[in-house]
Amino acid sequence: MEHIRRSKVAHLLKETGFGKEVNVKGWVRTRRGNKFVNFIALNDGSSIHNLQIVADTTKFGDELLRRIATGSAISVNGTLNESEGSGQNVEIQAAEIEVIGECSPDHYPLQPKKHSLEFLREIAHLRFRTNTFGAITRVRHAMIFAVHQFFSNKGFYNIHTPIITASDAEGAGEMFRVTTLDLNNPPKTEDGEIDYSQDFFGKSTHLTVSGQLEGELAAMGMSDIYTFGPTFRAENSNTTRHLAEFWMIEPEMAFYDLNDNMDLAEEFTKYLINYALAHCAEDLAFLSKRLQEEEKNKKADERSMELLEKLRFVVENDYARITYSEAIDILMNSKPHKKGKFQYQITGFGSDLQAEHERFLVEKHFKKPVILTDYPMSIKAFYMKQSDDGKTVRAMDVLFPQIGEIIGGSQREDNYDKLLERMRVLNLPEKEMYWYLDTRRFGSVPHSGFGLGFERLMLFVTGMTNIRDVIPFPRSPKNAEF
Amino acid sequence: MEHIRRSKVAHLLKETGFGKEVNVKGWVRTRRGNKFVNFIALNDGSSIHNLQIVADTTKFGDELLRRIATGSAISVNGTLNESEGSGQNVEIQAAEIEVIGECSPDHYPLQPKKHSLEFLREIAHLRFRTNTFGAITRVRHAMIFAVHQFFSNKGFYNIHTPIITASDAEGAGEMFRVTTLDLNNPPKTEDGEIDYSQDFFGKSTHLTVSGQLEGELAAMGMSDIYTFGPTFRAENSNTTRHLAEFWMIEPEMAFYDLNDNMDLAEEFTKYLINYALAHCAEDLAFLSKRLQEEEKNKKADERSMELLEKLRFVVENDYARITYSEAIDILMNSKPHKKGKFQYQITGFGSDLQAEHERFLVEKHFKKPVILTDYPMSIKAFYMKQSDDGKTVRAMDVLFPQIGEIIGGSQREDNYDKLLERMRVLNLPEKEMYWYLDTRRFGSVPHSGFGLGFERLMLFVTGMTNIRDVIPFPRSPKNAEF
C-alpha cells in the first residue's frame, strides 16, 4: 500500500481540501451497502463522529469487504470528497484498503446495536470503542487539562502529595492497609500484636484519603498550590456515587480567607464548565441526546435538566452565598419540609444536609448554584477555622444542581492553640502530626483550601448518573477487574 | 492596616511602575540593618529571588522589628521603588508592616545559613521555604504542565489507569499488598491459605507498578493516550536512585511502529527541556550555581557537565539511533572495556547494560543522546514485539548524559499467537489477563509506547543527585514520614 501520512478522523471531518489524497486508520464501526458500493463508518477515537469510507464493491471484491467487519482495524488510502449524504460534510473515496487486524463477528462483544451501560462496564477494556465512553474519555481529558491550565495561569504549583501515608487526614474514614508483611505469618510483638516496625516503612501505613494536610505544608512556603491525584476509601458502599479509588483536586492557598476561597471556587468551577462548553461541544451534544433518550420514559418532573442548559445554569449565574444557619431557616420554612416530603428530616442547627436538601436550595429556592458557609463545628473536620461564636467553623460547601455538594472546603485553623485543643478533643495523635502543627508554630498565616472530587465533576459535566461510567477502570467492593 | 490588593513577589520583581503603592505578603528570609534602616528579604514561593523591604527603624520601632525574624510571616504596604542596591531592580519602602505569624528563632529549624540536603529531608514539611526546594518545586510544576501541554497539543488523551490492581504489569517486581483484612485474624480457606475472596475486592490486590497494560487498552480505541500517575515498587533499595512511590508518564499509541515511537520520545524529551529552559531560567541558573558549589571540591574530571550546557546538549543534538548489538560492539572495542575499567563486564550479546556503559556511549562515544533498539528478548518484558530474527525484540531505551536510561519503551507485540506463546513461556496468568489478549483478538493494530520516570527527568533537569530531593515527600524503606 502506498505510504501517505496518516490523518486523524477529527482532522479530516473538518478538512475542506477536497480532492486531496489522504490516509486514515481506525476501527470499523459499521459496514453497510449494496452490490455496487459499501459504506464503512470508521472511528479512531478522535471524534464522536465517524468518517465515511466509500468503497466500490467491484474494485475491492467480496473477499476483502467481508473481512471489514465491525471492530476490525483498517488503513485506507483515498480521496477526500465533499459528501452528498446527510449527516456529514466529507467522505473518503477509497483507493486502497488494508485490513490491519481482523475481528470475528462471532466473538466480538461490541455489535452495532445499543448495549447497556452495565454490560459495557463488564467489558471496560473495549468500551473505549463506543460512542458514549469515547465522548466521556475526551471530556475527561479536557477537564484534566483545564484544571492544570487554570491553576498554572494563576501561579499555582501542582504538588504530588504522597499516596502511601502513615497519617489519616480526616481523622476518620475507612482506609486500605499497605503492607509487605507475610499475611500467613506476620511478625508479632511480645504483646501478640502485629509488629509493624518490621513492615516496609517501619510503621503501619495506608492509602491516603486526601492530600490536603501535605498540601497545606507546601502552601506554607509556595503560597498557592494544588494537588490532583488518586485518593481512596475502603467503604463497603456499592452505590452509583461511591468509588474505592477516585481522583481529587485540592488547592491550598496561603493568605486566603473564606471569601477569597469562595471566589476561587466559583471562578474555578465556571472556568472548567466554560472550557467544556468551548472545547467539547460535539461530545456534549451527543451526551445531552443520550441523556434525553435514557430519560424519555420518565415522567416530565422526574427528568434532569437538559445537559447544556444545566451547564449554562452554572456559568451564567452568580452563586448564592448564605450561611448554613440561613439555609436551615429556609429549609424549615420550605414546602417539602412542612409537607414531610424530605426523606431526611431537618430538625434545626446541627442537622447534616443531604443531597435532597442541597438540591432544593439550588434548584427550587435560589435557582442558581449555592455556597453554604459557617457550618456547625460538630459536623466538620478538626482543621477548619473556628469562628468567634464558639459553635461554627469557616467551612464552605459549593452546591450544584443534580448532584448537590460538588466542593467542600474551609479556611483552615491557623491558631496553634485552638488547633491543638481541637485535636486533643477529637483524640488525634498530636505527636505524630507534629509537622502539621509546626506550620502554625513558624510563621503561621491565614489560609484556605477546598476539595473537588473529579468524578463528581465528571458526572455533572457529562450527565452520566453512575460514577463507574466516568472513570476508565472503576474500583469498588468486590471489583478490581482489568 | 490599609487594604491594598496583594501582589506576588515574582510579579513585583518585574514591575516598573515605580512610585506605586503595593501590598506584599510572605515569609521573612533575613532581616539585617543598622540603627537607621532595616532590610527585610521577603519570599512567598513565587520566585527564587527575594523582594527587599526597606523599613526605617525610627518609623517602626525596635519592638516591631524584633518580631520580624527569619521564618515569620508579614504583610507589607509600601511604595515600589527602583533599587539602588546591587542584585535587585526594585525594593519596597515600607509604609505599614503587620506581623501575621511570628517565628521563634530559638525553635525554628531553618536558620539563615546553609543546611545540608540530608537535614532538609528530615524537615520536608518546611523545606518548601528554602531556595533549593522552592526552585525544585517550581521546576517540577513546569515539567508537569509541559507534559500535559505536549500531549494535549498532539491530540493525546490523559487516562487515569487504576492504582489498585489485581494484575502485575511487568510479570515481575516486588509489589505492595492492598488489603482490608484483619492481619491479627485473617480469614483462611480450608487449605489454610489466606482467603482473599473475603478481602475488599474479593481477590488479592496490590499497588500498580505501571499503567501500561491498561493504557494499551485505551489506545486500542482512542488511538493516542498517556498516563501520568503514581507507581510503586516494594524493593528494599535504600539508594539515591530508588523510591517506593514515584510518578510515571506512559504514552501508548495505536498505529505507531518503533520508528514513530523513537520520533515521539525524542520530540517529547526535547519539548520538556526546551520548556524548562524557556520558563525556568532563573531557577535553573540558581540550580546550576548550586551544583557547581557542591562539586567544587571534586576533581575536574569527576564533575558533572554544567547544568545548562547539559540541557542544551539534549535539545541541540539529533539523538544517535543504534541497535543494542551495535552498542555491544562499540563497548567491546572501547578503551574502558579493554583496560578493565568498567565495573560490570560486557561479555557480548545478552549482557545487560549498566549506567556506566550507557553513559560511555552518550558522553564519550557519540557525544549526544542515544536511542538503543532491538534488545535481546531474554532481558526484556513479555509484551515487546518479537523480531523475525527470533532473538531480539523491538525495544528502545533512550540514554541521557549523567543518568543513563531515561526512557524505556517498545513496539508492543500485536500478534495474538506470539503474545500468548510468550506469556506461556514466562508462566503468566493468561486467563486473568484475558482483557489484554482481547485487544489482539479484536481489531489488533501495531502499537507502541514508552515510560518516563518523572523523578528521573527531574534529576536530569535540576542537576540534583538524590531522588529524594526532587519529590516533596519521598517514600523509601523505613520512611513514610509526613
Image (cartoon, coloured by chain):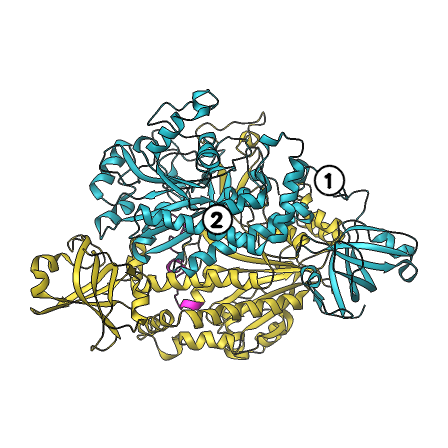
Chain colours: A yellow, B cyan
Tell me the tag on residue B239: none
Q: Which quadrant: the C terminus of chain B?
A: top right
Q: Quadrant of residue A450?
A: bottom right
Q: Position of residue B205 (x, y in %)?
A: 40, 41
The amino acid type of the residue labelled 2 equals: Glu
Q: Nearer the viewer, residue A303 or B460?
A: B460
Left or right of residue A232, residue B127 in this image: right
Q: Is residue A476 located in the magenta-colored stretch of the structure?
A: yes
The amino acid type of the residue labelled 1 equals: Lys
Left or right of residue B310, residue B109 in this image: right
Task: Note whether residue B192 is visible.
Answer: no
Q: Position of residue B325 (x, y in %)?
A: 33, 32
Residue at x-position 56% and y-position 52%: B277
Q: Which quadrant: the N terminus of chain B?
A: bottom right
For label 1, the crowd category at 10 Å Cα-Cα, with few meaning under 14, some 14 to 19 and many 20 or more, is few
Q: Position of residue A224 (x, y in %)?
A: 63, 58
Q: Is residue B293 located in the magenta-colored stretch of the structure?
A: no
Residue holding disc 1? B114
Residue holding disc 2? B316
Q: Nearer the viewer, residue A309 or B118?
A: B118
Residue at x-position 9% and y-position 65%: A57
Q: Quadrant of residue A193?
A: top right
Residue at mark 2: chain: B
Q: Quadrant of residue A429?
A: top right
Residue at mark 1: chain: B
The magenta stretch is A461-482
Q: Secondary structure at mark 2?
A: loop
Q: Nearer the viewer, residue B236 or A2?
A: A2
| Mark toward the viewer: 2 or 1 | 2
